[in-house]
Amino acid sequence: MRPLITLSYHNPDLPPFSIEFAGRRRRVLDLPLIAWLTLIWVLLWSTLTWANVVTGAVVAIAVCLAFPLPQVDLGLRLHPWGIIRLAAYLLYDMYTSGVKVTRQIFAGRPHRPAVIGVPLRCRSDLMLAATAVSVSNTPGGSVVEVRRATATLFLHVLDADNPAELETARRSVWKLEELTVRAFGTSDEIERVSEPPPRVPGSDTGSGSDSGSDTGEETS
C-alpha cells in the first residue's frame, strides 16, 4: 500500500526538501517555500509569536495545496559524501594551485598564456554553472566563457607553450566536473561522468592557443 506521505529523501524523483501527499491528485509541498511564506506572514504581523508562526504555516500549506505551482525539477540532488569530497578537493586544489601560480609569477621567465576549450560530459545548465564556479574558485583557473550549446568551458592558462600544462588543465576541469556532479547531480549525470572524458580535437586546441597567444602579446 502506498504511504499517504512520502518524504523527498525516500523518493529520489521528488525535489529536495519536499513532501508528497498521496491521493487522486498528486500534491507536492515544497518545504522551503512553506518556510518562506510563513516568514512573510510573520513579518506582515510584525510580531514573532507561536500563534503567528503556526497560523502562517497553516495558511502557507493551504495556499500551496489550493494553488499548486507546476513542479520544476532543477536537477539538484544532494549527496553528502560527494559534497565532502568536493569540498576537500577544492581546499587541496586551492592550496596547490596557489603555490603553483606563485612560483610561476616569481620564476622570472616569460609566459605564453592561452584560452583553451574543455568540453564537458554533462550538458545541463546547473552542472555547467556549478562546474564553472568550482573551476573559478581555484587560483589560475579563470573561466572566460561558458558555451552552453556545446557544453564547453573556455579556460585561461598561463603556460600554453607546454603541452603537458594544457593537458593538466583539461584533466583538472574534468576532475572538478566529476566531483561536482557526484555532489549535486542526478543519477544519470553521475553515470555520464563515470565515462572517459571527451576527446579534444587538435584544431580546437590549436585555435585556443592562437587566441591565447594574441592575448599574451597584447598584455605584454
Image (cartoon, rainbow, N blue to C red):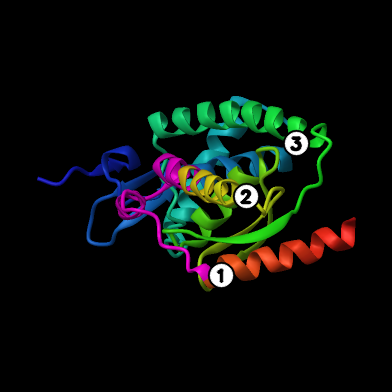
Q: Amino acid at mark 3?
A: Gln
Q: Secondary structure at mark 1?
A: helix
Q: Quadrant of the N terminus?
A: top left
Q: Where's residue 41, x and y in %?
A: 65, 43
Q: Secondary structure at mark 2?
A: loop
* Residue closest to the eye, 202 or 99: 202
Q: What is the number of callouts on the image?
A: 3
Looking at the image, residue 57 sits to the left or right of residue 122; the answer is: right
Q: Is residue 115 visible?
A: yes
Which region of the structure is painted magenta? 176-202
For image coordinates 28% across by 62% down, the residue present is: 25
Disc 3 from disc 2: Cα separation = 13 Å
Residue for badge 3: 104
Disc 1 from disc 2: Cα separation = 16 Å
Disc 3 from disc 1: Cα separation = 25 Å
Q: Is residue 148 visible?
A: no
Q: Residue furthest left?
A: 1
Q: Amino acid at mark 1?
A: Asp
Residue depth check, mark 3 versus mark 2: number of the one nearer the observer:
2
* Residue closest to the eye, 156 or 214: 214
Residue for badge 2: 162
Splitting the image into 4 quarters, where does residue 44 fall? top right
From this view, report whether residue 70 is shown above or below residue 168: below
Q: Where's residue 3, x and y in %?
A: 19, 42
